[in-house]
Amino acid sequence: MYSPRGAGRPKKVLGLLISAKIRFQHAQTVEEPSVKMPPFVWKTPVVAGSLLAGALAANQAGWSGAEAIMSRGTAGFITDLSFALGAGVCFGTFILVQRIAKPVLWVMVPICLYSALVLGAWNGFTSDFDTTRGEAIKHRIANAYALEHMSEKGRYLSCQDDRIELTGDAKALCVRVLNPAPGERIPGK
């Protein structure tokens, strides 16, 4: 094959011209100084939000997990879903904090454990997993409206609980609850 002496040169010259042009343009551009945000400015609110979200999720996971255990598997799909979502969100916040601020885990893990075990599981257990009953125990008073919005077992236990002071309308409701008519089912038993 015959090729003339300068046949490959135009491509080579063209490549050199293009690279020179790119280098010239790069040298002509003035780079503006970049303003970097200090890491603590964005990390602090992210870690604080993660801590709050993790503690609330751990609380839900503790309550739902203890309810699932105490009901021996009859708690239902929603309770199991609440446990799975709470545990997943709590675990996700641990992963996020581990990636951006690992030393904070020394504070976050005990807070989430306390939230899951004491605020979730223990408060759920003492209120028989009835939020309205838990509030009645916490405030040491209940009216008929609160008793009507409890589960049957929670209502029965609240009527007999010495820690809860009952209002006049609640006492009338408790008389009906504690003294069922013959043949009626005794709620809470």
Image: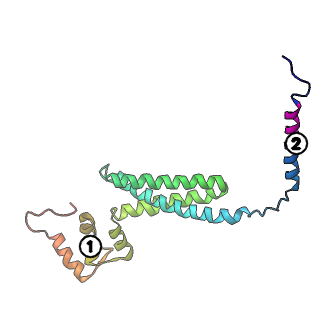
Count of labels shown? 2
Colour scheme in the image? Answer: rainbow
- State the residue position of label 1: 147
Q: Is residue 25 visible?
A: yes
Q: Which quadrant is home to the N terminus?
A: top right
Q: Quadrant of residue 159?
A: bottom left
Q: Quadrant of residue 38?
A: bottom right
Viewer-proximal residue, 28 or 69? 28
Q: Which quadrant is home to the C terminus?
A: bottom left
The amino acid type found where label 1 is placed reads Leu
Callout 1: few (<14), some (14-19), or many (20+) C-alpha neighbours within 10 Å? many
108 relative position to 2: left or right: left
Callout 2: few (<14), some (14-19), or many (20+) C-alpha neighbours within 10 Å? few
63 relative position to 179: left or right: right
Above or below residue 173? Residue 27 is above
Magenta span contains residue 67:
no
Above or below residue 29? Residue 146 is below
Viewer-proximal residue, 110 or 99? 99
- State the residue position of label 2: 17
- Residue at x 51%, y 55% (from the top left corner): 90
Helix, strand or loop at label 2? It is helix
153 relative position to 42: left or right: left
Find the residue positioned furthest to the top.
1
Question: In x, y percent, where is residue 187?
Answer: 19, 64
Residue 71 numbered tag = none
Helix, strand or loop at label 1? It is helix
Q: Quadrant of residue 20?
A: top right
- State the extent of the magenta-drawn residues as a range: 9-17
Question: In x, y percent, where is residue 60?
Answer: 43, 59
Find the residue positioned furthest to the right.
5
- Residue at x 35%, y 55% (from the top left corner): 78
